[in-house]
Image: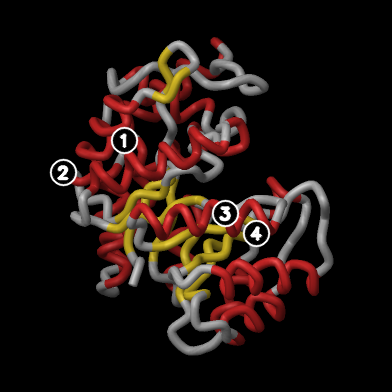
Amino acid sequence: MFSGSLVAIVTPFSNGKFDEKVMADLIEFHIANGTQGIVPCGTTGESATLTAEEHERVVAVTVEVVNKRIHVIAGTGSNSTDEAITFTKHAKAVGADGALLITPYYNKPTQEGLFRHFEAVAKAVDLPQILYNIPGRTSINMLPVTTARLSQIPTIIGIKEGSGSLQQVSEIIHSSKPGFLVLSGDDPLTLPMMALGGKGVITVTANVAPVDMAQMVSAALKGDYEQARTIHYKLTPLFSALFLETNPIPVKAALAMMGKMSEEVRLPLTSLADEYRPTLREALQQAEVL
């Protein structure tokens, strides 16, 4: 349903405020260049520092601008189950096609707690939901057995898997219900994950290289791994450069270098250190986007 290259889109700011015009321009850039879905209010969208009102506005603007041309999967996760339900209800109300829900961070639930958290959201909102496992951000790894349990809930249709473990990906695909969607949450592992049966990626890199990310994923879905590998290796320096500092610091700096937007981030994030800028610029040039 949501296969392909889905961009974890940045949230553009201007003088501390959400810049709706720049957001609309970025969305049009993606639609024109093959991105198959927009994912607002994820980690790359700095959801942690958006107010509840801003969060809902970013989702609403995204849905309005996209206007059903491609999918919108709204980031609606929280470490509070009640808040996750509220955000997911809002996403459904404004017309999002699905929701992306991160594992609760900081409060470190057990595997049973993770199951009950996602089960509660799924029962509360009739909207396709994708789980998001990213232990490096949350300190919790949702185990394949928990994901497999959750895959039996009809509303839960897939997972963005960012554990960095291909063994874990393999176990998820093998143990979950047939047709359960597995998307990469780690751009450099997209191609090997797809070789195991993954169906695409929710990607940071597509913010700056939408054409290549879309073509790489499309080639892999068609079984053309020779073409997919060629693109993968072309993008490899960019995969690294976009994580020279904490995401989304480098990708916002990259978009600024491309003339797309300001690189403004919100504290406690800071602008990209000067020492990393030549490396980032070189990677953008190698990827032929600058």
Q: State which mark lies toward you, 2 or 3.
A: 3
Question: In this orientation, does residue 288 appear?
Answer: no
Q: Which quadrant: the N terminus?
A: bottom left
Give the mark, 3 or 1, whose residue is nearer the N terminus. Answer: 3
Q: Residue at x 26, y 63 (%)?
A: 218
* Disc 1 residue crowd, few under 14, some 14–19, many 20+, Cα 10 Å: some
Q: Are marks 3 and 4 in contact (CB under 8 Å)?
A: no
State the mark number for residue 287: 1
> Residue 252 is drawn in which quadrant?
top left
SS state under label 1: loop
The amino acid type found where label 4 is placed reads Ser
Q: State which mark lies toward you, 1 or 4.
A: 4
Q: Residue at x 47, y 64 (%)?
A: 183
Give the mark, 1 or 2, whose residue is nearer the N terminus. Answer: 2
The amino acid type found where label 3 is placed reads Thr
State the mark number for residue 86: 3
Vertical arrangement, residue 175 with respect to residue 28, above or below? below
- Marks 4 and 2, how far apart at CA: 31 Å
Give the mark, 2 or 3, whose residue is nearer the N terminus. Answer: 2
SS state under label 4: loop
* Disc 2 residue crowd, few under 14, some 14–19, many 20+, Cα 10 Å: few
SS state under label 3: helix
Q: Residue at x 39, y 21 (%)?
A: 281
The amino acid type found where label 2 is placed reads Ala
Determine which residue is flagged by label 4: 163
Determine which residue is flagged by label 2: 32
Q: Are marks 4 and 2 in contact (CB under 8 Å)?
A: no
Residue 246: x and y, percent?
61, 31
Q: Which quadrant: the C terminus?
A: top left
Q: Residue at x 57, y 32 (%)?
A: 51
**Left or right: residue 261 compared with residue 182:** left
Vertical arrangement, residue 147 with respect to residue 37, above or below? below
